[in-house]
Structures are given as C-alpha cells and as structure tokens.
C-alpha cells in the first residue's frame, strides 16, 4: 500500500518565509502625521496616516497568526500520520 505523509518541513519553510516577509513589512517606511502644517485637510491626512499604521499592524498580526496556525496544523498532521501509520503497521507510508 502506497501512502502520502504530511511534510512539516515544507510548512515550516513556508511559515518562516511568511514571517520574514512580515518583518520586512513591519520595518518598511513609517507614516508620521504632520502637526506643523495648517493646510486645509491636514487633520484628515493625520487621521488617515494614523489609520494606515493601525491597518498595517492588523494585517501583520492576522497573517502572522495564520503562519503560526500553519505550523501548528502541520505538526498535528505529522503526529496523526504517525498514529495512523502505526495502526496499519506502516512506516513512512510503506509496508515493512
């Protein structure tokens, strides 16, 4: 019987890549509101600048949580594969 086993290594590589990208996003340019200028609309610009920082942080948090969940689920699949393989007397998806 030929089987397919879960690959935690691939999931970990993908999650690491996602986290690396998030660090790049987190460190990318900052938005700072201009409190010196009195141009009409400046208050709205300040509000948008603050909102953009908040939204960026929410995206980073959501995607980071998803990357962590990917690793957690991959670990659980690997563990379940081992249990199932052992119950069928298989090792690595192959009969001994």
Image (tube, rainbow, N blue to C red):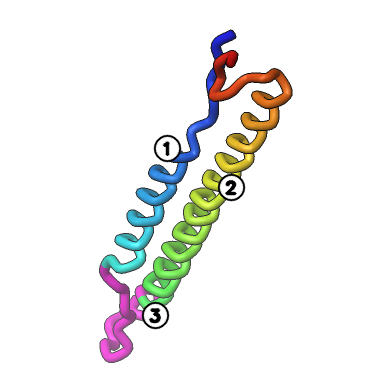
Query: Image check: 56 left or right of 39?
Result: right
Quadrant housing the N terminus:
top right
Question: Is residue 44 magenta-colored?
Answer: yes
Outermost top residue? 1
Q: Is residue 5 left or right of residue 50?
A: right
Q: Which mark is residue 84?
A: none
> Residue 53 or 72: which is nearer the viewer?
72
How far apart are the two marked residues, 3 and 2, measured between alpha carbons? 44 Å
What span is colored magenta in the figure?
A: 29-45
Report the predominant secondary structure element of the magenta stretch.
loop
Farthest residue to the right: give it: 87
Spatial CA span between label 1 and label 3: 47 Å
* Number of the front mark, 3 or 2: 2
Quick one: label 1, few (<14), some, or many (20+) residues within 10 Å? few
Checking the image for residue 10, the label placed there is: 1
Mark 2 and mark 1: Cα distance apart in space: 13 Å
Q: Residue at x 26, y 69 (%)?
A: 29
In the displayed image of the protein, which residue is found farthest to the front? 96
**Where residue 54 sits: x, y (%)?**
46, 69
Which residue does the numbered mark 3 point to in the structure image? 43
Pointers 2 and 1 in contact (C-beta within 8 Å): no
Q: Kindly state the secondary structure of the residue where label 2 is placed.
A: helix
- Confirm whether the magenta stretch covers residue 61: no
Image point (58%, 43%), residue name: 75
N-terminal of the pair, mark 2 or mark 1, is 1
- The x and y percentages for residue 43 are 39, 80
Look at the picture and state if 6 lies above or below 57. Answer: above
Q: Quadrant of the C terminus?
A: top right
Mark closer to the chain start, 3 or 2 = 3
> Which residue is more in the foreground, 93 or 89?
89
């Amino acid at each position: 019987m030929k089987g397919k086993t879960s690959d935690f290594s691939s999931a970990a590589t993908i999650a690491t890549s996602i986290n690396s990208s998030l660090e790049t996003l987190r460190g990318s340019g900052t938005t700072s509101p201009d409190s010196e200028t009195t141009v009409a609309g400046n208050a709205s610009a300040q509000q948008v600048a603050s909102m953009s920082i908040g939204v960026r942080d929410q995206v980073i948090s959501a995607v980071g949580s998803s990357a962590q969940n990917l690793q957690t689920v991959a670990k659980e699949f690997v563990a379940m594969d081992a249990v199932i393989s052992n119950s069928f007397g298989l090792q690595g998806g192959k009969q001994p």
